[in-house]
Amino acid sequence: MDSEFVIELEHVYVTYQTHLAVKDVTMKVRRGEFLALLGPNGAGKTTLIKTILGLTEPASGKVQVFGVPPRSLGERRSWIGYVPQATKIDPNFPIRVFDIVLMGRYGKIGLLRRPSRADKEATLRALKMVNMTDHVDRRFGDLSGGQQQRVLVARALVVDPKLLLLDEPTTGVDVTTSTSVYDILTDLHLQGVTIVMVSHDVGVVSQYVDKVACINQSLVVHGPPKEVLTEEALSDMYGCAAMMFVHGPMPHMVVKKEMAGVIGLEDVHRRKE
């Protein structure tokens, strides 16, 4: 991994049938950087993550991860950990927490091979990182929403990723779990892991990340939070009057009431008590 850039996007367009989801995005993510992708619902943030993963093919433009197109990663795909949006699993499906996390190793284990002792030890280490070792034998469907989210983070961490992609990892979880997830990500960032996270928590993520990329189909702004999260940028991103306020230790955003459902205001206003 010689390049200083882990992700390189050049004039990327992505379409779904006739719908333009991502428009002319050019952006680079340096090795060891912690980037938040911010924007309203339907702005193309999840699409961009899936394009970086190679799950969605761009209509035009160039995408490189670790210096190659995503679908050419080969064994380097195991360098990537991915936490998708909230996963729905039948609560009656008899799969243990341990097995959910172990699934994250399958790319390394290979087809028709049994997990090794090293795979099982890595699974336990990942569960320890998210404080879920006491639940290894519980059925995944019996856990609370916050506990399930921590297990899904562990599944992404079990490969010791060089790049971690997360899509709304704190949506729908309580403040304690949300704080726990951010603490885990901060530790990984300090260890040199490159992190890209989709989020609605504008005020919260600005405390943790190096850079933010504000997306509304196209790239509105990209840079350090203190420099780019301006009233003008937020207005361009959300299409309404919006501004950041600092009130105590937790910055937050205020928007017009009629736009709350569009941008996920319940997440934007979430604060530590």
Image: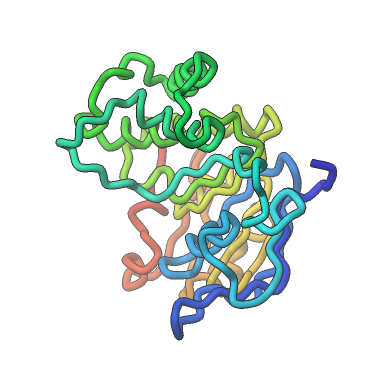
Q: Is residue 46 above or below residue 190?
A: below
Name which residue lies at 53% across and 37% down. Answer: 107
Q: Position of residue 36 (x, y in %)?
A: 58, 51
Name which residue lies at 50% across and 31% down. Answer: 105
Name which residue lies at 45% across and 66% down. Answer: 40
User: In what quadrant of the picture does the C terminus appear?
Assistant: top left
User: In what quadrant of the picture does the N terminus appear?
Assistant: top right
Q: Is residue 250 above or below residue 167?
A: above
Q: Nearer the viewer, residue 75 or 203?
A: 75
Q: Position of residue 125 (x, y in %)?
A: 50, 18
Q: Nearer the viewer, residue 68 or 152?
A: 68
Q: Position of residue 247 (x, y in %)?
A: 49, 45
Residue with the most extreme right position? 2
Q: Is residue 157 above or below residue 252?
A: above
Q: Is residue 91 left or right of residue 218?
A: left
Q: Nearer the viewer, residue 7 or 240?
A: 7
Name which residue lies at 55% across and 74% down. Answer: 14
Q: Quadrant of residue 161?
A: top right
Q: Is residue 93 left or right of residue 197?
A: left
Q: Position of residue 172 (x, y in %)?
A: 31, 45
Residue with the most extreme left position? 92
Q: Nearer the viewer, residue 49 or 69?
A: 69
